[in-house]
């Protein structure tokens, strides 16, 4: 894109008008027909069965076969938002595509695209790996897909909208990790009309040509080299540990920038070693880090042979999975939907649970799909948890709880971590769960979490008394850090933080759309519920870059007294808070935090109401 086209953009979510200028791109979108020719994907080693929905490509395969296969999967998944199909596309080390024949990997729902090298430089795609929105809604519902661990040289393709740019125009649950883009990157679906987008996540990447945020209302970038820089702030853009990030300037423009990320642990990933064997690499934890883990050599961490994993497939019994875990195995969950009527029990310290292709665990008969014992160093990544029609107390329980007398073994040097773990209450089917995620273990890292009580889905799966859930996240453990926390539409507090010394870097929230009246959404004389609640007993807590938005389409007269509630104590410090009413008939957030800050209401819809710093009862 030319410099003149990189103009400040602001927008709003679905049913809402754009605020500001649109990027003009005079390019026609050409239809790409999905080929019926199947690629003869390279088989995995004989001792490894990753299932039929893990497709492995190698550089010696015909380019036409690779393109035909990725096109056929995209054709199936492009509109398959609530479907059950899941795919992982793996690229063995080497180069794919060329200047004359670019490889255009379009990424639809429930599709994971990964390089199989130990570092991003091992796999190069000349072309693009693209996620786009839809005309009529933009990228507001471009969820549940990912790209990681490869290098992209952008080459013009037959779709003129992506010529010259790497387009990853997504919203929640669509992470970009360990990616090296040699050209300009856009997170805005600038060819769609409207071109809305509502939030994304990038970590451990290098975007050498810089990035256009465009219409993204909120976005979090962690430990990434932004090369030529970042453009457009909109409402809530947060950076931590990044190189060439915008300077701190909240609220005008709305950039929140931390020089370093306080604590992080990158997601484990599958790769092949020099002998062609599959292994899983588990990165080490970092503190006060800046830049990528791979800038100066291999990412620090531990490499595990695939023989140390139980490779689960849909249809495997939970008893079989739990037996393998009890024998000391890690767990690799291949793409698919797994019905879970008893908990998958993780009991051993340093267990790795890695999902491929947005593998989904669906609660049955009110079960908790996964529990983690009071042990340190567990890593859970790449899984989606769905509530079932019978209420579950929670969908993922990490640790037994401070009030249950357990040992609470935890370590700052070997923290438990969750990366790209997503939760749904309703959407594909009726779902009910009191809480989505309960964290009781100290020194836990929550890195890219989206807990979503569905605001849309298949007929009959969404409604105030249909997909019921009180709270998205409850934190009882101490020294828990969230880096990239998205929690939306829960019926009571969206987040409850009871543990000490908690930290959140970036929080995105929408309050529930569908409360039928104020009587159904209030407590103790308070209208509505706060999005983010720090318990009154907490002495120390800190958070940066928090946004909460209201759109009560069933009853636009609804009020929430405030979006953020914290104790009045000097050890609790909140930085860069925003509230926004998303529509002229969107409802009202009376205050930003603890009775302070201006009201977000229909008369100022689309305009953030902000508090820059809040502590000890004083807002600035």
Image: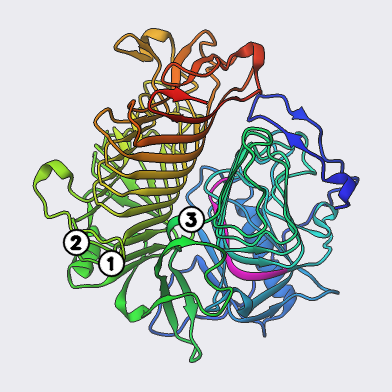
| Residue range (magenta) | 143-152
Query: Looking at the rendered structure, which numbered label has been put on residue 351?
Result: 1
Q: CA gap, disc 1 to disc 3? A: 24 Å
Indicate which disc residue 347 carries.
2
On the image, the x and y values in percent for residue 434 come to: 29, 32
Q: Nearer the viewer, mark 1 or mark 3?
A: 3
Residue 13 belongs to magenta span: no
Image disc number at residue 555: none
Q: Secondary structure at mark 1?
A: loop
Residue positioned 63% across, 47% down in the render: 170
Q: Which residue is mark 3?
A: 261
Q: What's the magenta bit mostly, secondary-structure-wise? A: strand
Q: Are marks 1 and 3 in contact (CB under 8 Å)?
A: no
Q: Nearer the viewer, mark 3 or mark 2?
A: 3
The relative height of residue 595 versus residue 419 in the rendered view (above or below) is above
Q: Nearer the viewer, residue 30 or 278?
A: 278
Is 64 placed left or right of 520 in the picture? right
- Of labels 1 and 3, earlier in sequence is 3
Q: How is the image coloured?
A: rainbow
Residue 525 placement, left or right of 595: left
Mark closest to the chain's N terminus, 3 or 2: 3
**Residue 37 visible somewhere in the drawing:** no
């Amino acid at each position: 894109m030319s410099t003149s086209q990189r103009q400040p953009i602001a927008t709003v979510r679905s049913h809402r008008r754009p605020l500001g200028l649109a990027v003009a791109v005079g390019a026609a979108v050409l239809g790409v027909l999905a080929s019926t020719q199947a690629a003869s994907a390279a088989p995995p080693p004989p001792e490894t069965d990753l299932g039929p929905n893990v497709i492995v490509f190698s550089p010696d395969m015909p380019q036409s076969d690779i393109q035909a296969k990725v096109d056929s999967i995209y054709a199936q998944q492009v509109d398959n938002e609530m479907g059950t199909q899941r795919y992982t596309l793996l690229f063995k080390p080497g180069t794919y595509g060329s200047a004359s024949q670019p490889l255009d990997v379009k990424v639809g729902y429930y599709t994971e695209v990964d390089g199989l090298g130990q570092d991003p430089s091992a796999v190069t795609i000349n072309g693009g790996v693209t996620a786009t929105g839809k005309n009529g809604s933009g990228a507001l519902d471009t969820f549940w897909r990912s790209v990681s661990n490869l290098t992209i040289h952008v080459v013009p393709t037959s779709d003129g909208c992506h010529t010259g740019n790497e387009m990853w125009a997504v919203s929640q649950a669509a992470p970009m990790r360990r990616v090296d883009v040699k050209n300009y990157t856009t997170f805005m679906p600038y060819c769609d009309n409207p071109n809305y987008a509502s939030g994304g996540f990038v970590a451990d990447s290098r975007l050498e040509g810089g990035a256009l945020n465009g219409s993204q209302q909120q976005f979090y970038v962690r430990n990434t080299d932004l090369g030529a820089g970042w453009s457009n702030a909109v409402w809530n853009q947060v950076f931590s540990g990044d190189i060439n990030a915008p300077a701190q300037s909240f609220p005008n423009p709305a950039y929140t920038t931390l020089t370093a990320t306080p604590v992080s642990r990158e997601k484990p990933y599958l790769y092949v070693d020099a002998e062609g064997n599959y292994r899983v690499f588990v990165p080490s934890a970092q503190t006060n880090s800046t830049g990528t883990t791979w800038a100066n050599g291999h990412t620090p961490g531990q490499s595990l042979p695939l023989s140390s994993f139980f490779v689960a497939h849909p249809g495997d019994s939970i008893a079989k999975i739990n037996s393998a875990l009890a024998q000391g195995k890690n767990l690799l969950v291949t793409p698919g939907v797994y019905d879970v009527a008893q908990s998958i029990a993780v009991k051993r310290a340093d267990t790795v649970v890695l999902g491929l292709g947005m593998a989904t665990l669906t609660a049955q008969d009110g079960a908790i799909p996964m529990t983690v014992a009071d042990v340190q160093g567990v890593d859970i990544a790449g899984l989606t948890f769905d509530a079932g029609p019978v209420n579950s107390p929670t969908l993922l329980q990490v640790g037994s709880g401070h009030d249950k007398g357990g040992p609470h073994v935890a370590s700052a040097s070997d923290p438990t971590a969750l990366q790209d773990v997503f939760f749904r209450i309703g959407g594909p089917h009726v779902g009910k769960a009191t809480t989505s995620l309960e964290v009781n273990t100290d020194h836990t890292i929550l890195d890219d979490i989206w807990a979503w009580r569905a605001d849309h889905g298949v007929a009959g799966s969404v409604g105030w008394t249909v997909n019921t859930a009180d709270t998205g996240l409850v934190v009882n453990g101490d020294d828990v850090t969230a880096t990239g926390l998205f929690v939306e539409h829960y019926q009571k507090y969206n987040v409850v933080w009871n543990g000490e010394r908690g930290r959140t870097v970036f929080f995105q929230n929408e309050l529930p759309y569908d409360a039928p009246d104020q009587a159904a959404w209030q407590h103790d004389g308070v209208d509505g519920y706060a999005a983010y609640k720090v318990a009154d007993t907490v002495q120390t807590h800190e958070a940066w870059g928090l946004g909460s938005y209201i759109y009560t389409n069933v009853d636009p007269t609804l009020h929430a007294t405030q979006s953020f509630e914290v104790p009045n104590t000097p050890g609790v410090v909140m930085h860069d808070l925003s509230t926004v009413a998303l529509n002229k008939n969107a409802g009202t957030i009376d205050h930003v935090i603890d009775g302070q800050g201006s009201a977000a209401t229909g008369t100022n819809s689309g305009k953030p109401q902000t508090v820059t710093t809040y502590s000890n009862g004083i807002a600035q």
